[in-house]
Image (cartoon, rainbow, N blue to C red):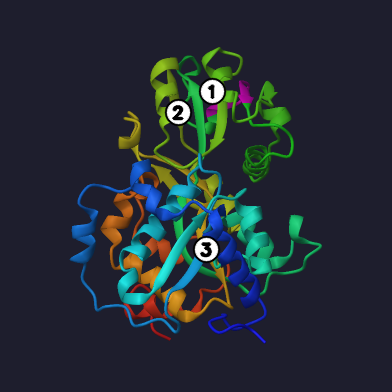
Amino acid sequence: MAAPGTPPGPRGPRWRRSIRRALGGTLVVLALLPGLGLMPEGLGASVSQAAGPPLPPPARPSTPFIVGTGNVAGTYFPSGGAICRLVNHDRPSHGLHCLVEPTGGSLDNLDALRRGDIAFGIVQSDWQYLAARGEGPFAGKGPFEGLRAVFSLQAEPFTVLARDAVRARSFADLKGWRVNIGPPGSGTRATTDALLTVQGRTAADFFSHVGEEDPGTQVAALCEGRVDAAVFAVSHPNGALKEAMARCGLTLLGIDADAVKRLCEAMPFFVPTVIPSDLYHAPGGDVPTFGPRALLLTTADTPDAVVRGVVRAVFDHFDDFRRLYPALATLTREDMVRSALNVPLHPAAQAYYRDAGLLPSP
């Protein structure tokens, strides 16, 4: 028989065991976030003044839960930290205790959600799409039918940087140049191949040389002139790219709108997006491109009170949420409830968005 306070459903006991391990020291608890520079000055006062009625009491008092993120040096960890920071700010009123766990990223988080080891996970939208359908690396596991969306997070644009000497204005201008698209099997290479395919091209016939540098060395390859352009999959603003652009004379290139439209129709886990010009002082205005998005996912087994608490913490304090981490600064409420969500919304999240006028009523 399950212990009192165990969430309903077959994944409940495992989730509780994971919580006990978390509280034993395997997690990075959100009390550390101010020291990481993720807590803007004065946040506590502004959060306490946010509009909206108080959260209803959760089904059970003092309910801890885990948000699986990514490597501590990446963008998913601080994004998860921002979510937990806001949830924990109102902990005395709703009893929810949010803990952020560094993980290996999207695939690890999907596996942990399927096992019931975490309540929420940050996952890239293309992996969400494949997991829900049991395709690609998930073919042996079958469709993840219980996977549910909570909201969309930052875009991860397909980013192309070229040396100024190339005098390119867009990705299409790179025909005949040396371009690094990443090693075989990498996400950047697969995405570049997909973009070229919808235009009837291949990397071998479009570029004079197909570079296979990994992400850790391609900035150096650009700056040293070993390649003329390179493809990145990153959130923005990105400090390393900004420094390289200034130091090495690099320019952001946009993607043709028709190619973006055709690719996103063929692969709906990609969405059109732009890289705002003011992030890098791009002279030609916002840079049009496309890419996946980071998503906050959960499962159908997660109690309504927990999902409702997370959604209200973020959307009732939306301006504070966007200030907690630079990659979140360009988010809009409308994009967060619609963009790249290819699995059903959790019912508690859907009900909040309808009440807030962000989704139409049934």
Residue marked by disc 2: 240
Q: CA distance from mark 3 to mark 1?
A: 35 Å
SS for callout 1 = helix
Q: Residue at x 40, y 28 (%)?
A: 242
Q: Which residue is mark 3?
A: 66
The quadrant of the picture occupied by the N terminus is: bottom right
Tags 2 and 1 touching, CB below 8 Å:
yes
Residue farthest along the front direction in this orientation: 24
Instruction: Specify few, some or many for label 2: CA neighbours under 10 Å numbering under 14, 14-19, or 20 or more.
Output: few
* SS at circle 2: helix
- The quadrant of the rendering that contains the C terminus is bottom left
Residue 13 location in percent, x, y? 64, 76
Rendered position, 138 above or below 354: above
Which badge, 3 or 1, is on the more N-terminal residue? 3
Which mark is on residue 219? 1
Three-letter amino acid code at the position of disc 1: Val
Task: Report the span colored magenta.
Answer: 173-179
Q: Which mark is nearer the camera, 3 or 2? A: 3
237 is higher (above) or lower (below) than 320? above
Which residue is pictured at 32% across the width and 56% down the height? Answer: 321
* Residue type, numbered disc 2: Ala
Left or right for 46, reference 230: left
Q: Is residue 122 visible?
A: no
Task: Give residue 163's position: percent from left, percent from top.
Answer: 49, 19
Label 3 with label 2: CB-CB less than 8 Å: no
